[in-house]
Structure formats: structure tokens, C-alpha cells
Image (cartoon, coloured by chain):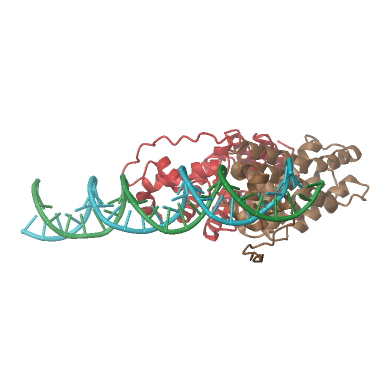
Chain colours: A red, B brown, C green, D cyan
DNA sequence: GACTCCATACCAACTGGTTGGTTTGTTATA
DNA sequence: TATAACAAACCAACCAGTTGGTATGGAGTC
């Protein structure tokens, strides 16, 4: 590809013994977010992780198996990070939701290849060609949606349910807007559509719950 | 002198002379939507289009150049299709917008590899590794957003502008929701999140313009 | 506490098949 | 008959995965 960003394949120092698997999963997240799944080779993953192919196929029977494991790894990495972002001290669940959305809008300002969702990028590419990876990404995204569902459930309990929506549908819709924002931001090579989408989502939620737009 | 009839082992009958380029672009849209960009090989594109590699590299200097051309081709294929879907006879622009959203929700019921957006799938994968393709996808998506911007502009003129939103931001947000819906539908291997997202988007627009939810 | 035993973790060279792209030649049409 | 539109064989680089090893550290024995 003509303008291929010179991906630095400089030799990463080898991870300490016992850390090769973890290093490979981290490398997968980093490289796949930047280049996609098929364009990321096993050799690249190995050199980025600082291990050899022998180590790779010791820990994973195939590249596909690494993809499945990386999708699971993604929840463990990013789930706690998101949880920490939302301010759990806020007593009003709607306040927590808005705080979470503000937090996500902050993250959106980071470079695109670190601000976007590993699972979304991966599943968009392999949904039809690898059922195991697709299902792992589905489970991952559901796991990321879940805590938000809890907040919406609490918000509906204390503020009343807006007509026609459920806590689950609102939580899923929220992540739908994130995923769409990632795609649009990549297309524009700019975070603006993502940040604006989150703002519109906040407006929607405010309107639904009859709250003044924050 | 007898000439042996060439037995065709191709998957697809060869297109008539002069149609190879078009056949390759159509094949690109079909295959990339299903398997992604990097996983789609030039050989596959050729056999799906019913031409040889000679024809491929006669029409395109590289695989990347085909990607750029396919992004442009996508507007020409899907743009008119969308335009025909929205009912232009409706005099109220807001009615036209809702009709368009209903149309998109109908399309969403098709199998995922034909219901989703070629440009979105492509740019998600190559945004960092091919600037030409990324920019072509950006232009394509802007071209698809544009007619909707016109409708929102007319809606704002006749119904008044809701606070804090513009015609352009609403049109972009609409396509953001589509793109996000595609990703979520792929992750769940089911159109439900996409269809529900469109329903929530309709609710948002109805709330914004103070219209009873259709 | 030195000593064997052994599973796990890792390494590096190699393989058969595939990749994007090239070369050279053929056919239709203006 | 000049030129665009193809076809087919070919190539060097690259790909996922394999092979046959070596290093490490912990458990068991004396």
C-alpha cells in the first residue's frame, strides 16, 4: 500500500519468562486496531511482542485462536478502565450515565488507533469468515454493555421509564453510537463525528428522561 | 485449423468485452463486504468477476487503486438506490426523513453481507494503512450523507431548529447510527440491534422536532 | 542441599502453499 | 493496422503453521 505508515517493527525487548502469552495478546490489540486482522501477520505479532513463532504456537493452536483469546483479553483490559471512568460515587444513576458519556468523549480525543474498539474493528472484518472470533467479539461487546444496562435500569427505576425503551435497549444503543462514531471518525480521519455523536446521544437521553440538557 | 473450445473453469462467466472493469468493481463490493479488504485477494476478485489478472492490472495499477475506485463506485451504485427509497413525493421534509429511516430499516432485514456499508467496512480496516482508500471512503460517506442533510435543512426551515443541532450534524449522526448498527449486528450475527438503533434514532428526531413518535 | 526427573516455556530454521504484481503474447474493434 | 482489452504463465516475497530442538524452574528423593 502506497502510503503505508512505517509501522515500527523495531525489536521489542523479550518479555520475562511466563509473559509471552500476555505480550502476544497486547500486541494483537495494538496491531489489529491499527491495521485490521488479516493484515496483521503472525510474524508481526511475534516481533511486536518480542517472542518467536515457536512461542506463539506454543500458546495458541492457530492465529484464529489468538483472535478469540484477544477478544476475551480486551474485556479484561478495557472493562475495568471504563468502570473506573464512570463516577460511581454519584448517587443519581442518570448522573453516572452522563459522567460516563463525558468520560468516553474525553477518550475519543486520543489518536484513533487507541481510541477505538478492538472488538468492533475485529468483528466487522471477520463476522462471516470466523464464527469463533465473531462470537467472542459478540460476548465481549455484551460484557461491555452490561454495566451500562445496570445504570439505565436504576435510572428508569428512579426517574420512570420513557415510553418504548428498556434499560437494555438504551445501553446497547449507546454502544451502537460509539461503534458508529469510530467508523465515521476513521472515515473523516478526525474525532469530530465521534464526539458530536456522543453529544447527540446525551441530548437524546436527556430528552427521554425529561432532564435539561447538561 | 481446428481450435479447441476453451473450457472455462471460472466461477463466473466472463463479462462481455469492455465490462471487465465494472465486473471487478462489483466483485470488490461483494467480496470485501463479506470478508474484508486484506482477506480478499486479487485472484479471488478476478475469478469472481470472471476475468484474469491480466485484465485486473490492465484496468488498475494496483490492488489499492481498485479499492479507491470501488469506493467511488459504491456511491454510484447505492446512492441512487437510497434516493429511490425515500419517498420524494412527501411534501413534509420530516415525513421524508421518517420514510427514509423506515426504508433503511427494511433493508436492514437483508443478510448482513449485503445490508451493510462497503465504505464503512473498508475504511474501518484500512484507515491507518492506506490514505488514498481512507480518503475515498470519507468522500463516499459524505456523498451519502449529503441528500439527507438537505432534508434536515428543509425540516429545520419548516419546523424550526431544535436547540444545539444543525442539519448537517443530524444527517451525519443518522449515518453514524447506521454504521454502529452494522457493527453491532455483525457482533450479534443478527439484525436486531441495527433495527432497534434505527427505531431509537426515529424517537430522537421525533423528540427533537416535537413530533409524536411515529 | 545437591541431584535427578520432567513438564512447561520458549527458540530458530524450515516448508508448502499463497500473495500482489510482471511479462509476454493473443484477440477484438475502430 | 494501430490500439485497447484481454489471457496465461511466471516470479520473488511472504504467509501460517511445523519441526526438532534447548532453557527454566519446581517437585520428589536421598
Q: Percent position (x, y) of residue D8?
A: 58, 56
Viewer-proximal residue among B100 and A5 = A5
- Depth check: give the residue in front, B3 or A119: B3
Residue B103, image x, y percentages = 80, 55
* Residue A176 showing in the rendered view: no
Please tell me in which quadrant of the rendered image residue B58 appears: top right
Q: Is residue B198 left or right of residue B3?
A: right
User: Which residue is at 77% across, 58% downward?
Assistant: B106
Number of callouts in the render?
0
Task: Tell me: A114 left or right of B164.
Answer: left
State the quadrant of the N terminus of chain A. top right
Identify the image quadrant of residue A185. top right
Residue C20 placed where, x, y %?
56, 45
Q: In this picture, is A179 found above or below B48? A: above
Quarter of the rendering occupied by the C terminus of chain A: top right
Position of A90 relative to A63 (above/below): above
Question: Quadrant of residue B147 in the image?
Answer: top right
Between B5 and B166, which is closer to the camera in this rendering? B5
Q: Residue at x 62, y 36 (%)?
A: B131
Q: Is residue A8 visible?
A: yes
Amino acid at each position: 500500500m502506497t502510503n503505508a505508515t512505517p509501522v515500527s517493527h523495531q525489536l521489542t525487548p523479550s518479555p520475562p519468562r511466563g509473559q509471552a502469552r500476555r505480550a502476544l495478546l497486547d500486541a494483537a490489540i495494538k496491531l489489529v486496531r491499527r491495521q485490521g486482522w488479516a493484515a496483521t501477520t503472525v510474524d508481526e505479532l511475534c516481533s511486536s511482542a518480542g517472542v518467536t513463532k515457536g512461542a506463539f504456537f506454543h500458546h495458541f493452536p492457530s492465529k484464529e485462536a489468538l483472535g478469540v483469546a484477544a477478544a476475551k483479553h480486551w474485556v479484561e483490559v478495557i472493562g475495568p478502565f471504563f468502570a473506573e471512568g464512570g463516577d460511581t460515587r454519584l448517587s443519581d444513576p442518570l448522573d453516572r450515565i452522563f459522567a460516563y458519556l463525558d468520560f468516553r468523549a474525553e477518550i475519543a480525543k486520543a489518536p484513533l488507533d487507541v481510541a477505538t474498539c478492538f472488538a468492533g474493528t475485529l468483528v466487522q472484518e471477520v463476522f462471516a469468515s470466523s464464527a469463533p472470533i465473531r462470537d467472542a467479539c459478540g460476548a465481549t461487546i455484551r460484557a461491555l454493555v452490561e454495566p451500562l444496562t445496570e445504570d439505565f435500569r436504576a435510572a428508569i427505576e428512579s426517574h420512570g421509564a420513557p415510553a418504548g425503551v428498556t434499560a437494555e435497549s438504551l445501553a446497547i444503543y449507546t454502544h451502537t453510537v460509539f461503534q458508529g462514531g469510530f467508523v465515521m471518525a476513521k472515515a473523516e480521519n478526525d474525532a469530530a463525528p465521534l464526539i458530536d455523536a456522543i453529544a447527540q446521544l446525551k441530548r437524546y437521553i436527556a430528552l427521554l428522561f425529561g432532564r435539561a440538557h447538561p
